[in-house]
């Protein structure tokens, strides 16, 4: 990977923050956008802005073709058919669609199995619906090293389990979970398997056929695409059996006072006017990532994580969380002595460094680790070891300021 060449594709990396060069380490929240993606969105709005599937005029036909082509690109990216890809506004919406579309059919004796590592988007909907409808939700424990407790998973998975929904890569710890093994175990109990791929699809090759998951939820904006973009893969047979949750235009084929019939896939689950520009932007982002190569991206991030973990160990008072490098994606969470994470992040900001400080929408995970908040640094394709050196210097400055 030619990192310097890649960095030139991202206009925002040219700016300064507090008179310091921007060091963007908040990629788990959202990634920056290359000019190729920005140009694709500008091109849509400048030259063929129109609603899709609604008109016979040239602009609508051009927009529809580009929007459908984006579905095809994403499908090829994760080895699925194009009509198994539903565009949503983010992983959160994708997981909520699944929770309500599938959860409303669960009975009181049914069980849903999730983990204490989940992002709130894959935790709260199941918890809420379980209490509302009476089905049972079980929570897999994590180890002290921030990995899933497989004994806990095996003991909680029963013949009553109807749905297993797990995060692929932890957005707080970077833990890479053995989802293929979990999916196999779920299917052995005839349970549906859902994967939250928000933090995996931007960083590693995803093959949904090899994983054999029933559903795979992801965000486009975490993989270089515009904000407000995401998607949901579903096996065709699973999508066909599942009722939609969002209703309105586009998702129907016919409506009468007697009944409504759903549209064909994937439009059955894309109610209303979609984020056409965003969908086209996802297609452009996939083109960009394919040009680099997902294998190279993962190797680059492992190199950065290993470098960062070794350097961070020398920061006075630091506490690192999460697994070893070979089981971790490009995310590192830490605390420094009794300095509040918000204070650490504020000092880093004065050095031009953007990180996340807080609970990262994973309260149950942090409670299991015995902490309330952490500082999180997350890396991507345009980050460098030199930027990590800037981070270390800034953390040492925070240590001096707060007298650790």
Image (spheres, helix red, strand yellow):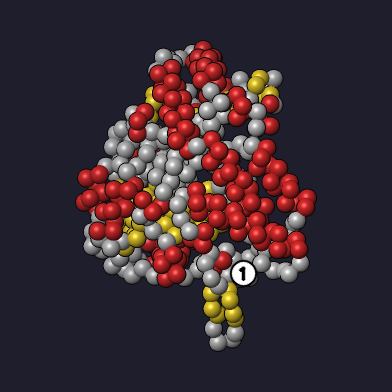
Whether residue 212 is visible to the viewer of this picture, yes or no, is yes
34 is higher (above) or lower (below) than 282: above
Residue 228, visible in the rendered structure = no
Q: Nearer the viewer, residue 119 or 52?
A: 52
Q: Position of residue 29 (x, y in %)?
A: 54, 39
Which residue lies at the image location 31% right of the left edge and 32% below the top edge? 145
> Depth check: 144 or 3 in front?
3
Residue 103: % across, % down = 40, 65
The reply, left or right, for residue 235 in relation to residue 155 is: right
**Disc 1 on helix, strand or loop?**
loop
Q: Height in image: 190 above or below 153?
A: below
**Picture quadrant where residue 387 is located:** top right
Q: From what the image shows, is residue 329 above or below residue 141?
A: above
Farthest residue toward the right? 46
- Residue located farthest toward the bottom when viewing the structure as drawn: 258
Q: How many numbered discs sit on the rendered protein? A: 1
Q: Position of residue 272 (x, y in %)?
A: 63, 65
Read off the residue under disc 1: 250
- Give the camera-side residue of 390 and 279: 279
Locate the C terminus and report the quarter of the image it occupies: top left
Looking at the image, the residue that sits furthest to the front is 291
Q: Is residue 211 left or right of residue 387?
A: left
Q: Residues within 10 Å of mark 1 (few under 14, many from 20)?
A: many
Q: Quadrant of residue 15?
A: top right
Q: Give the residue drawn at x 62%, y 69%.
A: 250
Residue at left offset 36%, top offset 28%: 325
Viewer-closest of 370 and 157: 157
Residue at the location (72% across, 69% down)?
55
Q: Position of residue 152 (x, y in %)?
A: 24, 47
Q: Please determine whether, in this image, residue 270 is positioned above or below residue 337.
A: below
């Amino acid at each position: 990977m030619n990192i310097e060449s890649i960095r030139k594709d991202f206009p925002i990396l040219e700016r300064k923050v507090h008179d310091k060069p921007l060091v963007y380490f908040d990629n788990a929240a959202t990634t920056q956008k290359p000019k190729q993606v920005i140009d694709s969105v500008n091109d849509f709005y400048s030259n063929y802005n129109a609603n899709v599937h609604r008109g016979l005029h040239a602009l609508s036909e051009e927009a529809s073709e580009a929007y459908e082509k984006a579905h095809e690109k994403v499908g090829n990216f994760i080895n699925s058919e194009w009509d198994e890809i539903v565009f949503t506004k983010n992983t959160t919406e994708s997981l909520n669609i699944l929770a309500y579309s599938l959860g409303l059919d669960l009975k009181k004796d049914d069980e849903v199995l999730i983990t204490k590592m989940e992002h709130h988007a894959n935790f709260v909907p199941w918890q809420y619906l379980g209490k509302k409808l009476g089905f049972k939700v079980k929570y897999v424990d994590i180890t002290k090293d921030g990995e899933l407790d497989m004994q806990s998973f095996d003991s909680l998975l029963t013949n009553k389990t109807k749905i297993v929904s797990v995060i692929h890569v932890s957005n707080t710890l970077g833990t890479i979970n053995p989802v293929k093994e979990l999916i196999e175990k779920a299917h052995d109990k005839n349970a549906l398997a859902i994967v939250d791929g928000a933090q995996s699809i931007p960083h590693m090759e995803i093959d949904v056929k090899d994983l054999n998951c029933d559903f795979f939820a992801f965000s486009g904006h975490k993989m270089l695409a515009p904000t407000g973009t995401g998607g949901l893969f579903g096996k065709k047979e699973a999508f066909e059996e599942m009722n939609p949750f969002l209703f309105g235009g586009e998702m129907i084929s016919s409506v009468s006072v007697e009944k409504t019939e759903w549209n064909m896939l994937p439009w059955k689950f894309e109610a209303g006017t979609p984020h056409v520009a965003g969908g086209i932007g996802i297609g452009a982002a996939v083109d960009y990532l394919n040009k680099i190569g997902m294998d190279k991206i993962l190797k680059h991030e492992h190199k950065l994580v290993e470098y960062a973990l070794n350097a961070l160990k020398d920061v006075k008072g630091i506490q690192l969380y999460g697994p070893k490098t070979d089981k971790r994606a490009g995310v590192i969470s830490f605390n420094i002595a009794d300095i509040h994470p918000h204070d650490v992040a504020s000092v880093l900001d004065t050095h031009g460094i953007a990180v996340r400080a807080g609970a990262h929408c994973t309260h149950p995970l942090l409670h299991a680790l015995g902490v309330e908040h952490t500082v999180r640094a997350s890396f991507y394709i345009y980050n460098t070891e030199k930027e990590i050196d800037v981070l270390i210097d800034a953390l040492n400055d925070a240590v001096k300021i707060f007298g650790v």
